[in-house]
Amino acid sequence: MPLTSVRLPSLLLLGPLLLAALVSVSTAADWPQFRGPHANGRVDVANLPTHWDREQNIVWRSELPGEGWSTPVVVSDRIYVTTAIPADSNSAAPANYTLDLLVLDVESGKLVQQINLFHQDNSAPKIHKKNSHASPSVQFDGNDLLYVHFGHLGTACVRVDGQVLWKNDSLSYEPVHGNGGSPVLVGKHLIFSRDGSQVSEVIALDKATGQVAWRTPRDTTEAKLFSFCTPLLLDLEGRQQVIFPGSGVVQSLNPANGEEYWRVRYEGFSVIPQPIYQSGLVFLSTGYMRPQLLAIDPTGSGDVTDTHLKWTAKTSIPNTPSMVGIDQRVAMISDSGIAVCFDALTGKELWKERIGGNFSASPILAGSHLYLLSETGECTILDISSTSPTEVAVNKLEERTLASPAVYQQDLLIRTANAMYRIHQ
């Protein structure tokens, strides 16, 4: 049964003057969302750590309660991640979870706050073995608000001091494999998708109240509707676009009202990688079962499948990790551990390197160093400044790692199945 609709604490209803009086001075975020400050995995830091293990160059390691694969979000001196905590940790297959926001001190790694937001009972379908009930990443608004999303289980707005301003758990649907995609903020709206077994649409909430502002159906012919994608925000020649892949189609939408600008059709479902914009083109993966890389000119209108799809690639394309762009190149790591780089304008394969292992985390690009974090906590660093990559280092934490890493100043933050690491060199 659907839960109650939007709930606004009485403080918010007292009016903007009281609320404004209680808001602290805005803080600067080092890592405000999934894939960082530019939402593309690129960081403006050239001297990130290149060598570490469980004993070397570890500032701290902090145990985390529960289970989750959301990326760490850093705001001032605090780290925010979500988690799902089983009600009965002794059960072989716990079905009841509390869904919490964890707040860590970035200097010490100490857990300073734990905020319960929602509850997952045993009525929800089972999740995939690689998923969690806390996989979407927190979205910071650049001022004082955090938007915490648990997919079909609910969305909340929380101040950086821990005060919950609103919750919306009225948009429940039947997922497949659980939740995954992170929300994005643009203008007055918080935007995410509802891509489940029976529904496929993009939703915008009023970021101030949590009420639904608009919803746009996918109108896809793909039989399997479920996907787990985070959209790309693009402001091109004065036209703001939310570019949102799903099963069988990618849509470009007007973030103000959900109106569709253009679409490209393809075969594929369970789309996970976030698109990127590089060299005037949008790059995305089409998902399962045989992912393709599409390079799309985002200036069209209507169905532009036959007119604005510039090139495609079919080998070593990721189902899960997102891509990174540098200069006129697009680099990526496949789920099965093959790193590949293409010329962004022509689609020519520039190099390919077998890393080995399995990958879910999206890579980070710092200067010319590409950080590739495997599911066993092994991070391979490649220098991709020349025509072929050079291995810089391979670093091992030897813990299960599916969350994408984050950056704080010159340090790496890596979330494993049981802990958070801060790494400094």
Image: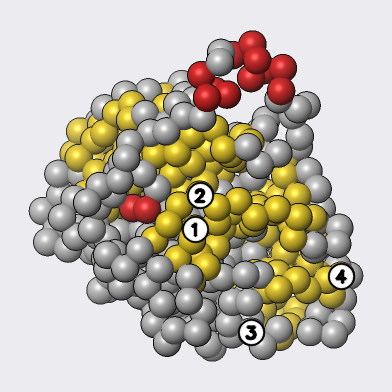
Q: Is residue 83 above or below residue 212?
A: below
Q: Is mark 4 on a helix, strand or loop?
A: strand
Point 81% across, 80% down: residue: 52
Going by the numbered disc 1, the residue's amino acid type is: Leu
- Labels 4, 2: front one: 2
2 and 1 marks in contact (CB < 8 Å): yes
Given the image, on which type of amino acid does mark 4 rest? Val
Q: Which residue is drawn at 28% across and 49% down?
A: 172
Dividing the picture into quadrants, the one containing residue 308 is top left
The residue lying toward the viewer, choosing from 322 and 96, is: 96
Q: Which of marks 4 and 2 is nearer the N terminus?
A: 4
Q: Name the residue under label 2.
A: 117
Helix, strand or loop status at disc 3: loop
Mark 1 Cα-neighbour bin, 10 Å: few <14, some 14–19, many ≥20: many
| Label 2, label 1: how far apart the Cα atoms are | 6 Å
Judge left or right: residue 2 versus residue 29: left
Q: How crowded is mark 4: few (under 14 residues within 10 Å), some or many (20 or more)?
A: some
Q: Residue at 33% across / 53% down in the picture?
A: 152
Circle 4 or circle 1, nearest the eye? 1
Report the side of 45 relative to 117 (left or right): right
Residue hosting label 1:
99
Mark on residue 80? none
Q: What residue type is labelled 3?
A: Glu
| CA gap, disc 3 and disc 4 | 17 Å
Vertically, is 182 above or below 384? Answer: above
Q: Mark 3 points at which residue?
A: 399
The numbered mark, 4 or 1, whose residue comes first in the sequence reads 4
N-terminal label among 3 and 1? 1
Q: Front-most of 422 and 320?
A: 422
Give the label, 3 or 1, closer to the camera: 1
* Mark identifier at residue 59: 4
Foreground of the two, 211 or 98: 98
